[in-house]
Image (cartoon, grey):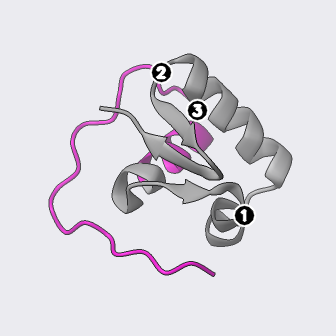
Amino acid sequence: MMEHQLATDQFDQLPTELSSPQAKLVYLYLDATGGTTVADLKETLSMQKIAILSVLSSLSKQDLVAKDGETYVPLD
């Protein structure tokens, strides 16, 4: 499992485009860690890979995350 330093500052308000609880969870985790892999999301959030990929695809289409190699990162 990859170790991540979580930000201690308060998080900005979640984007209004996020409607599903899974999308909010994934986005919040990406925002807190600065980016992570699908494998780390699967292990940490106990979600199925297919669900994670679906959420990441949706977030990418909304220009909220981008893929950098194997890592997904939040966009400002």
Q: Quadrant of residue 55?
A: top right
The residues tagged by marks 1 and 2 sit, at their Cα atoms, a distance apart of: 21 Å
Query: In the image, what residue occupies the spot 47% across and 21% down?
Result: 63
Disc 3 residue crowd, few under 14, some 14–19, many 20+, Cα 10 Å: few
Give the extent of the magenta segment.
Answer: 1-28
Q: Is residue 21 magenta?
A: yes
Are the residues flagged by discs 3 and 1 in contact, CB closer than 8 Å?
A: no
Judge whether 7 appears above or below 61 on screen: below
* Nearer-N-terminus badge (3/1): 3
Q: Is residue 6 magenta?
A: yes
Query: In the image, what residue occupies the spot 52% across and 34% down?
Result: 66
**Foreground mark, 3 or 1?**
1
The residues tagged by marks 3 and 1 sit, at their Cα atoms, a distance apart of: 21 Å
Front residue (pair 38, 44): 38
Q: Which mark is residue 39?
A: 1
- Residue 76 x/y as whole percent: 29, 32
Q: Is label 3 in a helix, a strand or a loop?
A: loop
Q: Which mark is residue 7?
A: none
